[in-house]
Amino acid sequence: MIDLRSDTVTKPSDAMREVMARAEVGDDVYGEDPTVNRLQEMAAGLLGKAYALFVPSGTMANQLSIRVQTRPGDEVIIESRAHIVRYEQGAAAALSGVQLHMIPTDRGILDPTQVEVAIRPTDPHTLSTGLICLENTHNSGGGSIYPLASIERIREIALAHGIPMHLDGARLFNAVVATGVSAAEYARHFETVSFCLSKGLGAPVGSLVVTNDRPMVDKLRRFRRMYGGAMRQAGILAAAGIYALEHNISRLKEDHEHARRLARLLQKIPTVSLDPDRVETNIVMFDLVDSSRSVQEIVASLKKEGLLLNAVGGTTIRAVTHLDVTVQDIEKAGQIFARVLSR
Ligand SMILES: *Cc1c(COP(=O)(O)O)cnc(C)c1O
């Protein structure tokens, strides 16, 4: 099976499993797991922040960041197809009591003027804007990269209104590798940044939240405990994260090359509509045109031929490249697409 459903399907390599097996551990609720502490220092350093907190998932990283920076009844400005909106079970409303102010865009990238217009005025009739969340790269936007200039402009607007910013950087390192802009340069504009070890970086579990604010770390720790995310001998998992940060960042460019290669193969198929300029990182979104079969039927046929993918609504299919996919797999995937789609 060639699995292009997501970069979350990556499995820990033998080398990664070895460092996990050897990891020094302690009770992290007491702050005594040396491997967790080392991962947190590394993550903070990479993102140019003073502190990092290891958490079980990207969802928890995002939700903790929202929780510590908002009050119930606040509004959070966010793009309408963000992971926080679509894939976190309404947690922002359920756990933080906030209202999401969703702004639709084409590719997941908010225009600074859209943000400016969405900020509520400070008068006693209106609710208050508590937080601005951006997502880089943007998953539902097709792995799109936030232009640094847009982030800088949004930051200026946020600062002028005294509103903090959170970055859902689940795939931040894909943006880093694609643009050459450092993670710290992106992170500089946000009070909190979350990123995932378990996507393209290939670790089995784990995400981090980073911040410069000491009191916020204590709050994050308390809410992590409340949400059930405080772990004990988590150094076994943190060791995989350290390995991922040391070995699997720069290789993300191979995933991007594979995505572009796949896009070129797909473009040759008459019933596929795809704009190759939109393949910026490791996600390829394409549409099926003039097909008598539904995307669900096509995805089922592809599966029978050994190719796993996700239909993401309407006529759109998403393919995600990752470290368990080789260039041969991409060539083979292209052949399976051509065969199934030309039937
Ligand atoms: C995957 C992902 C997350 C976190 O997902 P978990 O499954 O909770 O680890 C957050 N944001 C984005 C944009 C993602 O793609």
Image (cartoon, grey):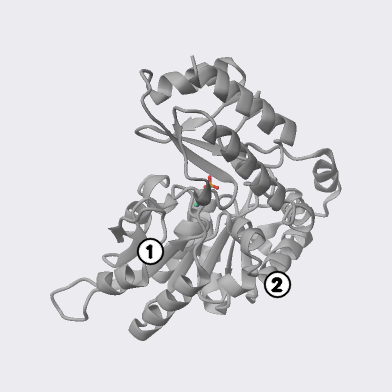
Is residue 183 shown above or below 317? below
Does 80 sit left or right of 282 as displayed?
left
Does 116 sit left or right of 82 as displayed?
left
Q: Secondary structure at mark 1?
A: loop
Whether residue 326 appears in this view of the structure is: no
Q: Earlier in the sequence, mark 1 or mark 2?
A: 2
Is residue 169 shown above or below 308? below
Whether residue 57 appears in this view of the structure is: yes
The residue under label 1 is 110
Residue 126 at x, y percent in the picture: 17, 73
Is residue 278 shown above or below 155? above
The residue under label 2 is 45
**Which of the pair 185/211 is nearer the observer?**
185
Residue name at image x 48 percent, y 58 percent: 62
Q: Quadrant of residue 55?
A: bottom right
Marks 1 and 2 close (CB-CB < 8 Å): no
For label 1, the crowd category at 10 Å Cα-Cα, with few meaning under 14, some 14 to 19 and many 20 or more, is many
Residue name at image x 44 percent, y 47 percent: 140
For label 2, the crowd category at 10 Å Cα-Cα, with few meaning under 14, some 14 to 19 and many 20 or more, is some
**Which of the pair 78/76 is nearer the observer?**
78
Residue 227 at x, y percent in the picture: 48, 53
